[in-house]
Image (tube, rainbow, N blue to C red):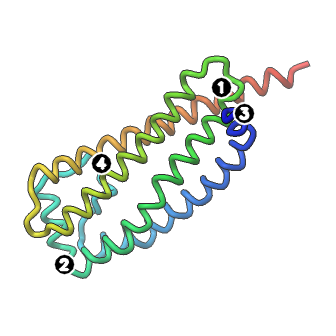
Amino acid sequence: MTNGILSKHAGPIAVGSGFIAASLYYLMITVTLAEIQTVSGQIPFDMRPFGYAPKEAGILLASLGADGREYYLSRQITLDTLYPAMLALSLSATILWFGRRLSNRRLIHIGVALSIGSALLDYAENLGIVTMIRSWPEVSAPLVYAVSTATILKSGATTLTVVLVILVGSKWMQLSKTDLRP
C-alpha cells in the first residue's frame, strides 16, 4: 500500500522537495558559505569534498574569529539542517518516480539507501562542525579526522546518488520512447 502511494505522489514530491533543496543550496552557496569564505579567506568545511586535516581545520576556525564561528553556527548550520533532508527526499522521490517502470528494483533500492545515507552523513558532518566550533581552540585531531571522513563519505554518497538518478532517468526515457513507438 505504501509503495503505491509513494509511486503515485513521487513526481510532485520530487519537484517540490527539489525546489526547496535547490533554493536552500543556492542560499548557502551565495550567502552563508560565501560569507564564511569572505570572512576567513578559507574554503568552508562543507565545500571540501576531499576532506581536511587538523591543521587546515585550525586555520579555518582561527581565521573565522568569534563572530565568524557564531555565524557558521547560527546561519550556515541552520540552513544545512534543512538541506540534507530535502535533498534526500528529492533524490529518493525522483528515483522512485523514474524507477516505477523498471522491472529490476535493485537500482531503486540502492539509490534510496544512498540518498538517505548521504543525508545522515551530512548530519554527522554538521554535528562534527558544531562540536569543532564549540570546542575551539581545543579541537582534537581525532574529531577533525572523523568529521573530515564524514565530509568525504557524504560527498561520495551524494555523487553516487546523483549518478543513479541520471541512470534511472535515462532508462525511464528509453522505456518512454519504446512506449511511443507504433
Query: Disc 2 and disc 1: Cα gap in Å?
Result: 50 Å
Indicate which disc, 1 or 3, sits on the residue closer to the N terminus: 3
Q: Residue at x 24, y 44 (%)?
A: 149
Front residue of this view, candidates 25 and 90: 90
Query: Disc 4 and disc 1: Cα gap in Å?
Result: 30 Å
Residue labelled with disc 2: 65
Residue labelled with disc 3: 4
The spot of residue 24 in percent (x, y) is 51, 63
Position above or below: 100 against 152: above
Query: Disc 4 and disc 2: Cα gap in Å?
Result: 22 Å
Q: Secondary structure at mark 3?
A: helix
Query: Disc 2 and disc 3: Cα gap in Å?
Result: 51 Å
Q: Amino acid at mark 1?
A: Lys
Q: Secondary structure at mark 2?
A: helix
Indicate which disc, 4 or 1, sits on the residue closer to the N terminus: 4
The spot of residue 55 in percent (x, y) is 10, 58
Residue labelled with disc 1: 171
Q: Residue at x 79, y 25 (%)?
A: 177
Quadrant of the rendered image containing residue 138: bottom left
Indicate which disc, 3 or 4, sits on the residue closer to the N terminus: 3
